[in-house]
Amino acid sequence: MTEGARAGAVGGTVAAGGMSVELPLWKAISYFRVLALCYALLRYFNSYLHFLHPVAGWIFLGALTLWTLASTRAFSNPQRCTWWVLGFDLALAVTGIVMSGLTDAPARISHGAPTLPTIWAAGTVLGFAAKGGWRPSAAAGSVVGVANILGHGGPTGDNIHNIVLLMVAGVAIGYVIELARASEATLTRALQVEAATRERERLSRDIHDGVLQVLALVQRRGAESADGTGGTDFAELGRLAGEQERALRALMTGGPLPAQRGPEADAAEPRDLTALLRPHADERITLSAPGTPVLLPGPAASELAAAVGAAVDNVRRHAGERARAWILVEDEPEAVTVSIRDDGPGFAPGRLGEAERAGRLGVSQSIRGRLLDLGGTAELYSTPGEGVEVELRVPREGAE
């Protein structure tokens, strides 16, 4: 994830390039609430003598002041401004509007006197807009509007006018913030694709300068062997090196992988997993499988067999020359499970993480990566001195 995306994740939106439209808006709402509070206090100070119950108004404004100051930090960031905070904010605004109808003189109300919170209630609607978009904003604006009509003067022209302005402002800002989030998410994805492309180009250069040249050399030497200057084993090695070189070049350029030779190319038909695993069995490795074929779709069977091959290769390379291994195939209605267990020295906890950080990705890619692509799981268990057990499980539903 890029730094810009991290900043957006912390701020509650997906940001790109280290910039975010949403965070400045939250700060603006926070400043607006403080300024609106000052305006409400000033308006009430100039008119409280005309109220029927001025003390009640001062009590409410005192509570409003404490809440506004206490929630200023919450309203500066969408992570801190939870729905509970917004809900209490809305309840406080509605309470102030209803109290205005009970504490103010009816004559003043009929002549369009403002409510106790005045424009402070608009900050609540803007908070809903910034948090959830135009729909929550419209809902909060409707609640404030109903409170004005039922609790402060009825459906007068001034009330309707103020409600319409509040709804338009809240819905517009909510819609803009939704567009901003979508745009920032799109930009972040584009930056991630660009970063992945650059990394792929860098890896392609490294592969071209190293692996491909070695494979090409092995292929040429294998061709020479086929012409009579070497053995047939080296000729087969050269052929395989050529296939891997073509596959790597296709992977580097993003093109389709070349068709494989042999029975692996026919991936449409179900394949017997036991038949694919049988070549691994020898005097050191014992294969135990059901007497009936263990059928899986071609690609799934090939990938599972390749993962087992990687585990067996690890046994041959790391368990020691005298170590033995056992492959157990279990064919269940829901899944196929293959266990590979050896009596080698095992490994210490954390060894796989160290190998992965060092660039040795045999377990993470050749085993776990394959099973993850199949929708299955790969579990490794080991205790120093007691060998290693690898359990590969592929659900039949995911394999199909």
Image (spheres, rainbow, N blue to C red):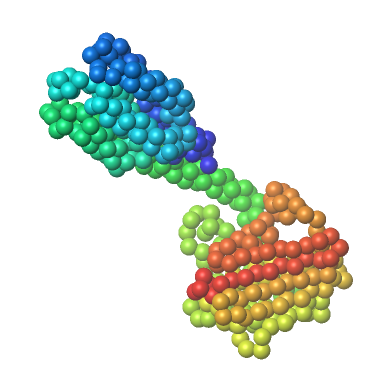
Is 278 displayed left or right of 37 in the figure?
A: right
Residue 377 sits above or below residue 63 on the image? below
The total of numbered circles placed on residues is: 0
Q: Quadrant of residue 214?
A: bottom right
What x and y, as percent, mark residue 98? 27, 30
Residue 328 sits above or below residue 180 on the image? below
Q: Nearer the viewer, residue 376 or 110?
A: 110
Task: Name the residue rendered at 25%, 26% in the picture.
Answer: 102
Residue 259 sits above or below residue 199 on the image? below
Is 187 displayed left or right of 138 in the figure?
A: right
Q: Farthest residue toward the bottom?
A: 291
Q: Farthest residue toward the front?
A: 52
Task: Name the residue rendered at 35%, 34% in the picture.
Answer: 91
Q: Nearer the viewer, residue 385 or 201?
A: 385
Task: Name the residue rendered at 25%, 38% in the picture.
Answer: 142
Is 230 displayed left or right of 198 in the figure?
A: right
Q: Nearer the viewer, residue 231 or 273?
A: 273
Q: Is residue 124 visible?
A: no
What x and y, as percent, mark residue 311? 71, 67
What x and y, as percent, mark residue 229? 73, 70
What x and y, as percent, mark residue 252? 53, 54
Residue 378 sits above or below residue 106 on the image? below
Task: Name the residue rendered at 63%, 59% in the picture.
Answer: 365
Q: Quadrant of residue 296?
A: bottom right
